[in-house]
Image (cartoon, rainbow, N blue to C red):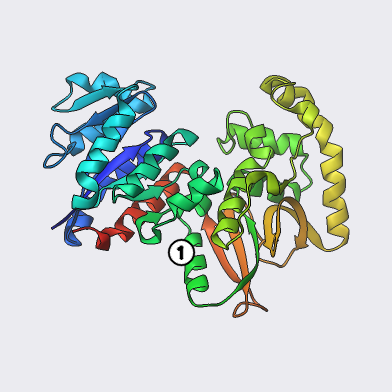
Amino acid sequence: MKKIPLLLLGCGGVGRQLLQHIVSCRSLHAQQGIKLRVIGVCDSKSLVAASDVSVSELDDRFLLEACRIKSAGSSLSTLRSFGECQIYGHSELPQRVIEIASLLGKATGLAVVDCSATMDTIDLLTRAIDLGCCIVLANKKPLTSLMEHYDKLVSQPRHIRHESTVGAGLPVIASLNRILSSGDPIRRIVGSLSGTLGYVMSELEDGKPLSEIVKAAKSLGYTEPDPRDDLGGMDVARKALILARLLGSRIVMDSIKVESLYPEEMSPSKMSIDEFMSTGLPLLDKYINDRVQKASLHGNVLRYVCVLEGSRCEVGIQELPKNSALGRLKGSDNVLEIYSRCYSQQPLVIQGAGAGNDTTAAGVLADILDIQDLFN
């Protein structure tokens, strides 16, 4: 039985779902001769680790209780009385994670899994790379930081997986790596990589006003608590930056042209969420509807996409043919069109659910298993 030690950074929606996936897949993994040994779980305030990370682990009952505690909004530190474990506070957390990485990295190939949503993990991840660990990311922010951080994180390509940073469980990164490794130059990528904005754009075709669609999306749980976090396009821009860097562009976030669906005067610093939803959004309806009508006259539809072509990297609304893969997109699916020498006339199309905790966590789990051959 191959045992893979795992340290989880971040116990939010994706992190909790990952732990639940690990527990529910025990019998499947046993058939494959694999055991994922969760030796530690971090949230922003504390680290809960096995009593002896070299030989012991946090058992499944403990992991499910950790999920329950975090779902209820409590800190992992409340697990102090639940089974044998060691709990470290915020001030001790970084040093203890480094100690665990130093102990297990080169010896057993510790997998450090980042399911947080913060830049604060960058130092831990770069140290983990130096100590021989493998890193698996759902967190986009480290890969969209400074180029020196990116270079360090990808300095050992076989030791990093980050499929879920772009398309949740979709094989976007793996497909691009296969194409690039074959020597087939990628000339253009066009993708709808936001489930929220994909839903909004496809609903506009039915003549519904933007304000009504966004309110419905918020009530369905498709948007962030403040929908401007989606409508501003920064999540798509981060994904575009990751793709651009994968293709060899040495650019930073400021290099990307990003179109926001709302003007600066409606930004969070100038308008509350309630004001934006009640009075700000309706002011955008006519402008967006006019763009929908104009696109329709050309036989096109509007999609919020990222476009990568040569040195060009843009994020925003584009008119696209109705009969294209992106034009046919409905609901919250993600779609990516990849054009290369081999895929010049008909692009390689990757489509499917590209958002959601369950789908993202499944992608993270697949990435963890994908690096198993690096483990002793």
In the picture, measured across the screen, residue 35 lies left or right of residue 315, that is left
Left or right, 134 with reference to 224:
left
| Foreground of the two, 178 or 335 | 178
**What is the crowding at mark 1: few (fewer than 14 residues within 10 Å), some, or many (at least 20)?**
few
Residue 283 seen in this snapshot: yes
Residue 256 visible within the image: no
On the image, the x and y values in percent for residue 62 come to 20, 32
Q: Is residue 370 above or below residue 266?
A: below
Residue at the spot of label 1: 174
The correct choice, above or below, for 121 with respect to 247 in the image is above
* As drawn, 129 above or below 8: below
Q: Residue at x 32, y 53 (%)?
A: 368
Vertical comparison of 238 with 243: above or below: above
Q: Quadrant of the N terminus?
A: bottom left
Q: Residue at x 79, y 46 (%)?
A: 207
Q: Is residue 157 left or right of residue 77?
A: right
| Number of numbered labels in the structure image | 1
To which quarter of the image does residue 216 belong? top right
State the residue at coordinates (43%, 50%): 153
Where's residue 363, x and y in %? Answer: 41, 53
Amino acid at dot 1: Ala
Front-most of residues 266 and 313: 313
- Screen quadrant of the C terminus: bottom left
Residue 365 in the image: x percent, y percent? 34, 51
Residue under the image location 76 percent in, 35 percent down: 262
> Most extreme residue toward the left, as rendered?
55
> Is residue 178 or residue 364 the one in the foreground?
178
> At which x and y percent is residue 134?
32, 52
Q: Secondary structure at mark 1?
A: helix
